[in-house]
Image (cartoon, helix red, strand yellow):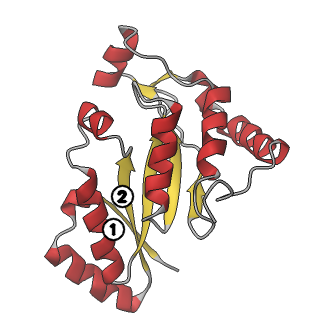
Amino acid sequence: AVLSIASRPDCINEDVLALLKELNLIKPVWVELGLQTSNEKTAEFIRRGYKNEIYERAVRELKKVGCKVVTHIILGLPYENKDDMINTALFVGTLSDAVKFHMLYISKNTDLAKLYEDSKFSLLTQEEYIDVLCQCIRVIPKNVIIHRLTGDADKKTLIAPMWSANKKKVLNEIHNALKDRDVIQGEKLAR
C-alpha cells in the first residue's frame, strides 16, 4: 500500500517536504502534480499559476525526500498543436516517475465553456486524441509508469467532447490503436 497525495507544485515548501519525508518512512508516498502543459503561454492562458521551473523544483525536492511523482498532462488545451503536446510529454518524461494523461473536456458554467461556446477554439476528436496520445507514449521513457490514458468528466456537467462520456469505448479504441500501430513506450527516444 502507498499513500497518494495530490497537490500543486507551488504548494511544496519546506514544512510539507519535512512531513512527506516523515510519512515516507512509514509507507511509500506518491505525490500527484498537475502540470497540464509545459508550454508557458498555454500555462498562463489557463491560469495555471506557476512557471515550469516551480514544477521542476518541486519534483527535485520531492524526490530528495524519497517521494515518487505522478504528473498530470492535458492533451488538447486551447491553441496547442501536436508538437506542444508531445513536448509536454518529453518534458514530463525527463522528470516524473509516472504520468496521467487526460483529454480536455468542457464543463458547464466555466470560463472555458464560454470561450468554447464563442467558437474561440476547437476540441480534439477522438481520433485526434488517440493519435497524439500514441505519439506521446512513444516519447515517454520506459521507466515512467503510465497511470492513466484518458480522463472523464461528470456527465451531468459535460458540454464536450461527448465522445469522452463513454470511457469504456474510448479505452477500447485506445487499446486497439496501440496494438494496431505497434506503439512501444519510449521507442522515439534517442538511445
- Can residue 135 be seen here? The reply is yes
Q: Is residue 159 left or right of residue 174?
A: left
N-term mark: 1 or 2? 2
State the residue in front, 109 or 124.
Answer: 124
Q: Where is residue 144 in the image (x, y as percent from the top left)?
A: 56, 66
The residue at the point 50 percent across, 36 percent down is 83
Q: Where is residue 116 in the image (x, y as percent from the top left)?
A: 39, 15
Local packing at callout 1 (Cα closer than 10 Å; few below 14, some 14-19, many 20+) is: many
State the residue in front, 72 or 56.
Answer: 56
Local packing at callout 2 (Cα closer than 10 Å; few below 14, some 14-19, many 20+) is: many
Residue, disc 2 = 33
**Up-down: is 16 above or below 151?**
below
The residue at the point 29 percent across, 79 percent down is 20
Q: Quick one: SS at disc 2?
A: strand
Q: In which quarter of the image is residue 10?
A: bottom left
How many labels, in total?
2
Q: Distance between the residues labelled 1 and 2?
A: 9 Å
Name the kind of residue labelled 1 in the image: Val
Residue positioned most to the front: 191
Name the kind of residue labelled 2 in the image: Leu
The residue at the point 70 percent across, 42 percent down is 171
Residue, disc 1 = 59
Q: Position of residue 185 (x, y in %)?
A: 67, 58
**Up-down: is 159 above or below 180?**
above
Q: In which quarter of the image is the C terminus?
A: bottom right
Question: Marks 1 and 2: CB-CB under 8 Å?
Answer: yes
